Amino acid sequence: MIIKTRVIPPDINHLEMLLRRIKVNHPVTPQVEEMLSTKQAGWHGEQSLDFHLDYLKEPHSILHNLRLHDGHHFFQIDTLILFPTFILIIESKNMKGQISIHREKKEMRRDLEGFQDPVEQAERQRDLLEEWLLRHMGLTVPVDFLVVFTNRKCTLEFDSFDSRIHEKVIRATSLVGAIERKKGFYQEEVLTRVEMMRVGRALADAHQELVPDYMKRFNLNYSDLQKGVRCPECGKYFMRKTPRRWKCAHCHCTSVNAYELALKEYAILVSKTMSIREGQDFLRIGSRHVVYRILSAYAQSTIGGGRYVRYVL
């Protein structure tokens, strides 16, 4: 049973919004594209695990993309599986090329690039989850982990003193077999089905989504963004408000609600509130009355009053 489904992470959506809005040929564009590509690759790697997880035998409960607070900082888990006898963390890596894992040096290398040792990363997640379960639920449950490489175009090599490294770091095609072997190590039932559901719901409720500020991350300002309403057909910011709809001055496409994406992008990239004047500037509308009608219909609520009123997007 899936308690927390896998959904596209907000940071991917936010980076896509930023790429659409950032001015043409902006010098930071290649950095944004590179980060988006990396995050999309990780997302696709996590998605590819679902095929293999479908073959798991019941009973179990699955939670995807957990982000929990340990009392000091947040820690993230790609996939968490609750079994009656133990809990399993799956840390997925979608990397291609020749991957070398050096346990003694606590690092992973791909050509000349260095990365954190994924086993050490998963061990840290295990320790933090055990502490979280004890602190918040009074539970002592065995927690294990697997590091799963999902990209077929990678080769793995190990320079390790850890003789059981092959039981900790695997390919996605070996996932089901590796999980079955893990289940063989844990014989004592510590969670009933009801308790599995209770723990799963508690973890899902404790999840806190990361809302990244990529404008700050890339040192961007409002002036770095393209203004206007984007045409859903040609992608240009040439939509103009007519009495009943929006019309693109470039391709003549019409839309009733094209402005909604613009307001959503403003809320994500600039501010969650908007004044009439800011709406005029961002939507490229001269009339205050038109912007007033748009924001009054779209906004969830308002703050302030009179000429200082701001609309909560």
Image: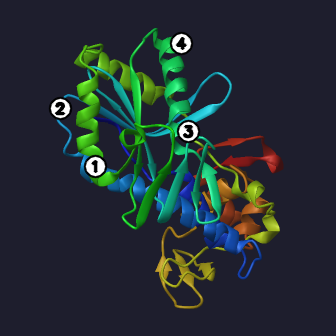
Secondary structure under badge 3?
helix
Q: Earlier in the sequence, mark 1 or mark 4?
A: 4
**Residue 267, position as x, y percentages in the image:** 65, 54
| Residues at marks 1 and 3 touching, judged by CB atoms closer than 8 Å | no
**Residue 166, position as x, y percentages in the image:** 38, 43
- Residue 27: name its quadrant: bottom right
Which three-letter amino acid code belongs to the residue tagged 1?
Answer: Ser
Q: Residue at x 34, y 56 (%)?
A: 48
Secondary structure under badge 4?
helix
| Label 1, residues with CA under 10 Å away: few <14, some 14-19, many ≥20 | few
Mark 1 vs mark 4, foreground winner is 1
Image-based side of 243 in relation to 173, left or right: right
Q: Which residue is mark 3?
A: 121
Which three-letter amino acid code belongs to the residue tagged 2?
Answer: Glu
Numbered mark located on residue 135 in the image = 4
Is 34 situated above or below 1?
A: below
| Label 4, residues with CA under 10 Å away: few <14, some 14-19, many ≥20 | few
Which three-letter amino acid code belongs to the residue tagged 3?
Answer: Gln
Secondary structure under badge 2?
loop
**Residue 168, position as x, y percentages in the image:** 40, 39
Q: Residue at x 25, y 28 (%)?
A: 183
| Label 2, residues with CA under 10 Å away: few <14, some 14-19, many ≥20 | few
